[in-house]
Amino acid sequence: MTASTNPQALPIAITMGDAAGIGPEIIAKAFRDSPADTKGCFVVGDVATLRRAAAVVAGHGVPLPVAVLNHAEEALHCPPQCIPLLPIDLVVPADAEPVPFGQLSARAGQIAGDCVVWAANAALRGEVAALVTAPLNKAALSMAGDWLASFPGHTELLQALAASHSHTSVAQLPVRMMLANDELRVVLVSIHVSLRDALAAVTFDNVLQTLLITHHALQAVLGRAPKIGVAGLNPHAGEGGLFGREELEVILPAVVAARVQGVMASDPLAPDTVFMRARAKGSQPGEFDVVLAMYHDQGLIPVKYLGVDKGVNVTLGLPLTRTSPDHGTAFDIAGKGIADASSLVAAIRMARQLCAAKVLL
């Protein structure tokens, strides 16, 4: 394998996120405090915002300059404890003053969206190893303009960009969200939709598709077929049809169909206990490698309860590696220098692990 095709020999792009939120300052903290993890990474964003973030987190006697790059690969040779930044052509002027902290704005949404588009296309072209996305604000993204406004978040935007790159439709490039930390992995059947629409999305095809995407993605990471615990939709997984028949008529048939294709998936299990059964404790692994959750909050509440500082969001099914911190823009504390960069650092580490798994395939 040549260096040009080896993702471990390429830099990792970190998108700036919403400039009014904590994204830029947790990026600055990560480069300040975790030089080994951020080595070979660079930020996609604008100079003024990152310099402001560097000033917010300055302290402990550690200078934190922003090194402006001409090309992404220059990040591989940057010294530690500086922020390598690749400015991109933004619809909003890059030399403008940064947006105010904690304020929702179309300008911040536009910049955040532009950064994701650039970085995703670079990853699709094979110019960067992986994409780590700092939090963007969905409301700001929706204010940004006609095209960006059509996407409720990173996942859907990345799916559309990947489909366009592959000359296919979004429907033919299904993706799923996985939330992971050291104790638990969860993959969701549906993501950013209303609860009513999420219940309607629990169909045979969607459950089967999610099982297959989960199986193939984690098989590459683990080097074996993952053990998937399947959460029921209803209390007590329907209690044999007493509390709903989705488990009997939709979920279990999809599980059976997946097993025919080599997927190791459980029958639908009570959703109030399956996450505890899957949780790893220290060196003791859980009963399952991952839990398939039927909708967004069913899966994210247990992961986030274990600590948002440890959680990582991974998009499965894309022809690129994308990870993200498991938290939002936190407008209420932006600019105060108190935001925790742990989840971002975990996302960078996860991106490297996924790139290494690709090399081993």
Image: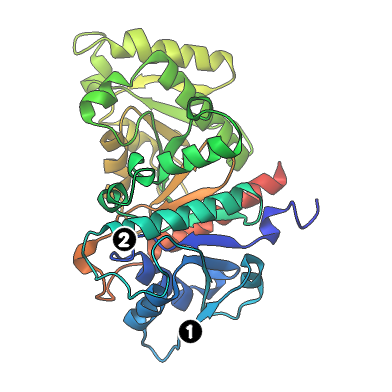
Q: Horizontally, is 322 left or right of 25 in the view? A: right
Residue sitting at 40 percent across and 53 percent down?
Answer: 113
Q: Is residue 137 placed above or below 303 in the rendered structure?
A: below
Give the CA separation, mark 1 to mark 2.
Answer: 25 Å
Residue situated in front as seen by the camera: 266 or 96: 96
Q: How is the image coloured?
A: rainbow
Q: Is residue 155 placed above or below 108 in the rendered structure?
A: above
Which of pointers 1 and 2 lies earlier in the amino acid sequence? Answer: 1
Q: Secondary structure at mark 1?
A: loop
Q: Amino acid at mark 1?
A: Pro
Q: Which mark is residue 107?
A: 2
Q: Which mark is residue 193?
A: none
Q: In this orientation, does residue 318 appear?
A: no
Q: Position of residue 153 (x, y in %)?
A: 36, 44
Q: Quadrant of the C terminus?
A: top right
Q: Position of residue 296 (x, y in %)?
A: 30, 35
Residue situated in front as seen by the camera: 63 or 260: 63
Please name the residue that numbered disc 1 is placed on: 65
Q: Amino acid at mark 2?
A: Arg
Q: Is residue 244 placed above or below 199 in the rendered structure?
A: above
Q: Residues within 10 Å of mark 1 (few under 14, many from 20)?
A: some
- Number of dots carrying numbers: 2
Residue sitting at 26 percent across and 9 percent down?
Answer: 245
- Determine the image quadrant of residue 108: bottom left
Q: In this orientation, does residue 150 appear?
A: yes
**Of circles 1 and 2, which is in front?**
2
Q: Secondary structure at mark 2?
A: helix
